[in-house]
Each structure stands twice: as C-alpha cells, then as structure tokens.
Image (cartoon, coloured by chain):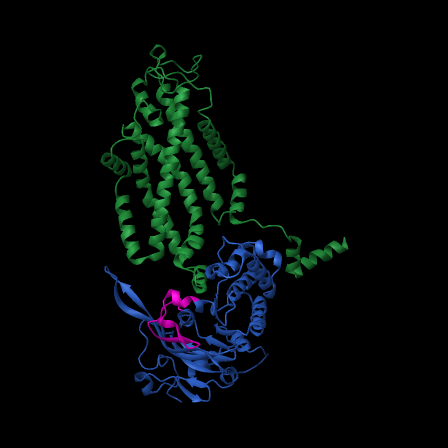
Chain colours: A green, B blue
Amino acid sequence: MKPQLQNEQEKVLNPTVVMEGKRGKRADGPWKIACKKIIRDKASMVGFVLLFLFLCLFLLAPVLPLQNPVEVNLAKRLQPIGTPGNMLGTDHLGRDMLSRLIWGGRVSVVIGFIAVGIALVFGTILGLVAGYFQRFFDTVIMRFMDILMAFPYVLLAIAIIAALGPGLLNTMIAVSIVGIPYYARIVRSSTLMYRNMEFVLAQRALGAGHWHIIVRHIFPNCLPPLIVAASLDVGWMILAASGMSFLGLGAQPPLAEWGVMLSEGQKYIRVAPHESLLPGLAIFLVVLSLNLVGDGLRDALDPKSK
Amino acid sequence: MAKLLQVTNLKKYFPVKKGLFRQTVSEVKAVDDVSFTLYEGETLGLVGESGCGKSTLGRTVLQLIKPTSGEVVYRGSNLTDMNFRELRPFRKEIQMIFQDPYASLNGRQTVKQILQEPFQIHQLYSRKEREERVQEILEKVGLNKEMSNRYPHEFSGGQRQRVGIARALMLEPSLIIADEPVSALDVSVQAQVINLMQDLQEQYKLTYLFIAHDLSVVKHFSTRVGVMYLGRMVELAEKSSLYKRPLHPYTKALLSAVPVPKVGSKRERIILEGDVPSPENPPTGCTFHTRCSYCMNVCKQERPNFKEVENGRFVACHLY
C-alpha cells in the first residue's frame, strides 16, 4: 500500500510525473472530443442512424429490385398500401409509390446538400472577407446581405426562379442564394471575434500574410458553428425545394420528387390519402433526422458543454 | 553597448468615430511622443498602470499597429516606412510574447503545428529539420518532447506560456517584446517563467522589451526601467538608481505603493488623488499636473521635455 501512496503524493507534488504516465499517447483533438460527445447523445445518434439508413436506401436505388418510377400503368391506379407487387400502393397513374419515394428521395437529398454546399461556400467567403478586411468590404457585402435578408425567403426564391425559369437546377440555385446571407453572418461574427485574438496577432508578428491567417487560423475556428448551421439547413433546403416543386416551380412532372408527388397527390387525398401522406412523411422523417443530427452537433461542438 | 533599437518621437493616436457618418470627433493619444533607445543584450522594463499605452507602444514598435508618426529604427533600418514585404526579414529579428496564454495559442493546432508554423511562413528548413528544431526548443523551454502532439487546452497556463515563448524563439530573434508575459500566471509559476526567460536571454543573447505592471517583477528582471503615464514616458533610468532614488513624482508614488515584506516596516505612502485623466482629452502641459503634489504654474501650461538630467537618466518634469 505504501509505495502506491508515495506515488500518488509524487503525482501531486510533481506535475511532470503525471505527464510521464501518458507518454507517447496521442491526445484527443477538438474534433475527437466532439465525436465522443455525440456518441453519448442518444437523440442525435437516432438522427444519425436514421439519416444513414435513408442515405443508404437512396444510394442503393439503382440496384434495388424497384419498378420504374415513371412507368405508367393505368390498370393499377390508386392501389392502397399493401397491394401485392406494390408494397406502398400506386399513385393516380399507377406508378409504384415505393419506387417513386426512393427515387424522389435521391433528388431531394441531392438538392438539399448541394444547395447548402453552394450557400456555404459563397457565404463563408463573403463572411471571411467582410469580417477580416472590414471597412469598405464589410459595408458593401453586409448591406447587400441585409437586402437579401429583408425579403421573405419564399418570395425571394420565387422571384429568383421567375427570373431564371422553372426547373430543378434553378430551384437549387434559388434556395441556395436565399441561404447565403445566413452563412455570411455566422462566419463574419466569428471572424470579427478571432481576428483580434492574440494568436492571430502572433501570426502577424511572425510575418504571416492575410491569406495564410484567414485560411489556417480564422477559417478552422469558424467551422463548428458552420457545421451546425449547415446540418440544420439541409433539412430546411429540402423543405424549401419541395415547397417550390409543390408550387410547380421546381422539379417538373413526371420526375419523381417529393414536392411534386405531394402536389399531385393532394387532388386525390380523399380517395387515396397515401399518395400525398407518404411523401409528406418522408420529408418529415428526413428533416427530423437532419435536425436531430444538427442539434447533436451543436451540443458537441460547443466548448462550454461538457 | 551597441544600439539595437532606436525609437524617436513615436506617436499613435486612435481616432474616435461617432455619429451617422462615423466622423472622427477626437483622438485617443495612446502613445504620445515616446523616445528611447534599446541596447543589445539589455532588458528594458516598461511599467505604468493599465491604459497608459504600454501594450500599444510594444505593438507599434513591432509594426503590428502602424504609428501615427515617429520612427522606429532597428539596426539602422527604419521600420516605420516599410510595407508588409519589406518588413518580413525583420519579423525574424523581432518577436513577441503575449500576455494571455489562453488567447495566444490557436486551440485547433497541436503544439508541433504551432511551433512549425514560423518555418512554414518563412519557408525555412526541411521537414526533418523542422521536427528536430521543435524537439530541441521544447526541451529548452522545459517541456516534454512527447508533448508536441498535444493541443493547448491540455496544458496549464504556465505550460502554455512556455509554448508561447518557444514560438517566439523559433526564428532565433534578437529582440523580444514581452507584453506582460507573466501577469496572467499565478505567482509560483511567474517565478519559473521569469527564470526561464533569463536563462534563454543568456543562451540566445536576447534583448528584451519587458512590459509589465508589477514593479517587483520588473525590478528582478530589468537592467533599465521606463515609467509611462498617460501615453508618455515620464522617467527612464538604470534599475538601481530608479528604485533607490526616483525623481519623477509619479515614479515616487508608484514605488511607494510596492508592499515591503517586513513586519512593522514604516514607509511613506504617497497617495495619488483622483483618477487617471482620459487619454482622449489629456490635461494641458504636464499630463500629471492634475494629481501631482509638487505642481507649479509652469506645469499647467508647458509640457516638460524628456531630458537627460544625469548620465543615462531621463526625466520629463519641470522640477529638474
């Protein structure tokens, strides 16, 4: 017992002894700590699992034994859920719902991620420039962002689509333009905070250029809030794009897309509720899982939460 | 002793902007007409209360903040006229240690990345040499070699400050501006870091501009001491003569505030009345006249020159 006690005492008296104990072991970085927090968070794990399953399903669509999502079979129209051969029934043109849902999910998820990606890239660049260089750049960029934010987002998206013409690609562009100001603001505020920290000053004293400081020091520190915003926004973008399609501005029939399916199905809601409820449910589940993931990331990347 | 750095009439005024169009309504005179010389191998301590412009002076010398006017001459080259590119070779010569060891290291880099970055910026050495130099310097500043893969959040304040010192030494500078390097640390660690800085000074033949507000730390560490008040240098002298016989009334008051570790020791405390005036609107004449017990009529009107009253001893006061 005694030698152990002595060892403990030594640890207290001499902090380097404690360090010796951990010798050689690579320590946890900020990202690894975040990962550990997420694994402990049940709600966000549910979100991750759900999202993972959805993504697998959408990715595997071409190899799954699915019927052609646009093949019309008028003899079998408006079949209810559970019909042999059409597990989730058929729509008003006799197309297989399961196949349309999965193929539609591919479109929606791709729109969501790409639209967020576009908004993220442009918003980040604008925010970094505005926050770092300040003065003229800040005024010009942020006033323009304010103008974009002053419009109701649906109205702005509709206006952009009206200018570009309806279609899937233009919808994606429209919803991502709507998203740019939010990212620009997040990045700008982080940049304003970090650009005056002493570690940035230390880089200037070492002779680092602006570009080096922005890319190596300010941008990595802006990442946590960006990741959170982006993960929450994928759901929002899917919803917005589906909304545009529902209004007939986005994806055009006969393409399988959840917004289009909802819009077509609503006419038959009394006779065949599944035609509109199923795509609605799909949107709900994907957006929910993305929100759970986003919330989990927010808690995990927040340095104040333990 | 050879001159290393000559600062002449250095001024830094920060504009105060107000109103709809952000017009400049006034100026904060953070550093107002400061001149001094740094000699090779010495440690010049710079003291003064908070807000007197010590840190701004340090940063202006390093050209992190461009001065409003005045000159900073390093080994015959005037740094104030230089642009970013021209300054780069001098970045290797003059380095800085910061006050807050928590804010001065990027939390998303490992110690190794932090210490190798100076080499990346200046494109020095091969990958292997960089690695070796990091190991070498870690040992010099009293850190374990195995710690190079860790992140700053795993270190104590004292250890972080050692990393900060190591980073400043990577480029083998001649002059280090230490901006309150120990004031964020607790007292036992302060002593360790100060001793480390002294050891390194001998090894690397460093010159320090040591900014602090703790008079006993400065007394222990410096060869000469400069006292600042409201953006101006009021007294500059050899350490021993300044601590033994302060000339400027402000220096006297400052030194009388240092606690004496002796039971029953009696000393005269000079209590200054009122607050430090705003640097946005400093008093006319001598900036200290509002609080000075020796204030004369001339003090209110004429600004005293910063002149050499004895050999190597500068004072800005009408009394001398």
Q: Is residue B68 magenta?
A: yes
Q: In terms of depth relative to the viewer, which is nearer, B186 or B191?
A: B191
Identity of the residue furthest to the top in this view: A75
Identity of the residue furthest to the right in this view: A2
Give above or below for B97 relative to B230: above
Residue at 51 percent across and 35 percent down: it is A45
Position of B172 compared to B277: left or right? right
Residue B277 appears in view: no
Residue B204 appears in view: yes
Q: Position of residue A230 (x, y in %)?
A: 40, 41
Q: In terms of depth relative to the viewer, which is nearer, B153 or B95?
A: B95
Give above or below for A39 relative to A84: below
Give above or below for B244 relative to A111: below
Residue at 33 percent across and 83 percent down: it is B303
Q: Which quarter of the picture shows residue A93?
A: top left
Q: Position of residue A197 (x, y in %)?
A: 43, 59
Give above or below for B32 relative to A269: below
Residue at 27 percent across and 27 percent down: it is A248
Q: Position of residue A276 (x, y in %)?
A: 35, 22
Q: In terms of depth relative to the viewer, which is nearer, A14 or B90?
A: B90
Q: Position of residue A13 (x, y in %)?
A: 66, 61
Which span of residues is magenta-colored?
Answer: B63-88
Q: Is residue B259 magenta?
A: no
Position of B265 compared to B38: left or right? right
Residue at 32 percent across and 25 percent down: it is A260
Number of labels in the image equals 0
